[in-house]
Every structure is written in C-alpha cells, then in structure tokens.
Image (cartoon, rainbow, N blue to C red):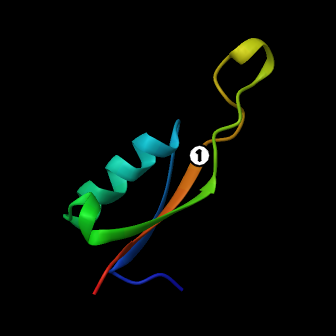
Amino acid sequence: MLNQDEIEVEAKTAQEAIKIALFKLKVKKSEVEISVLREENKGLFSMQGSKLAKVRVKKIR
C-alpha cells in the first residue's frame, strides 16, 4: 500500500506523470526515487495512446 511519501500517477507521458507526482508530493526530482511502471502506448498511426504512462515516485529519506 502506498503512503504519503509515495505516489503512483498516470499521464499521457512518463515525464508528465513525474511532474505531476513531484508537484503533489511537493518535492524536487533530486529528493525522490522514480520508477516507470508503464510507458505510454501510442495507438494506430501514432494517434493518442490507448494506455497512459504510469510512474511511482517515492521520497528518499
């Protein structure tokens, strides 16, 4: 189970998901450990993906 020091976020891209997670946790990128759980999956003819990117961001203690 995730706690206040860890969050999972989905967004159009992994970079966007990381930015959202950093904002929600109120931390800098250097203060966290980032795991990309899933890259975005682009749909047919490179249209917007059918699956969003998903990341887990955890504060380093």
Quarter holding the C terminus?
A: bottom left
Quadrant, the N terminus: bottom right
Residue sitting farthest toward the top: 45
Q: Nearer the viewer, residue 49 or 27?
A: 27
Depicted 26 relative to depicted 20: above or below: below
Picture mark count: 1
* Corner quadrant of residue 45: top right
Q: Residue at x 33, y 80 (%)?
A: 5
Residue tagged 1: 53
Q: Looking at the image, is 13 positioned above or below residue 27?
A: above
| Amino acid type, residue under disc 1 in the picture | Ala
Vertical side of 42 occupied by 17: above or below: below
Name the image quarter holding residue 47: top right
Left or right of 14? Residue 42 is right
Q: Is residue 24 left or right of residue 33?
A: left
The residue at the point 29 percent across, 58 percent down is: 22
Quick check: 12 left or right of 41? left
For residue 28, above or below residue 31? above
Which residue is drawn at the image coordinates 40% and 52% (left, top)?
Answer: 18
Which one is in front, 8 or 34? 34
The local crowd at label 1, few if under 14, some if 14 to 19, many if 20 or more residues have their Cα within 10 Å, is many
| Location of residue 25 in the rendering, given as x and y in whole percent from the top left corner | 26, 67
Residue placed furthest toward the front: 30
* Along the line of sight, the residue nearer the viewer: 35 or 47: 35
Residue 19 position, x and y percent, is 33, 48
Closer to the camera in the image, 42 or 28: 28
Q: Mark 1: which secondary structure?
A: strand
x, y percent for residue 8: 49, 64
Q: Position of residue 53 (x, y in %)?
A: 59, 46
Residue at screen point 80% across, 18% down? 44
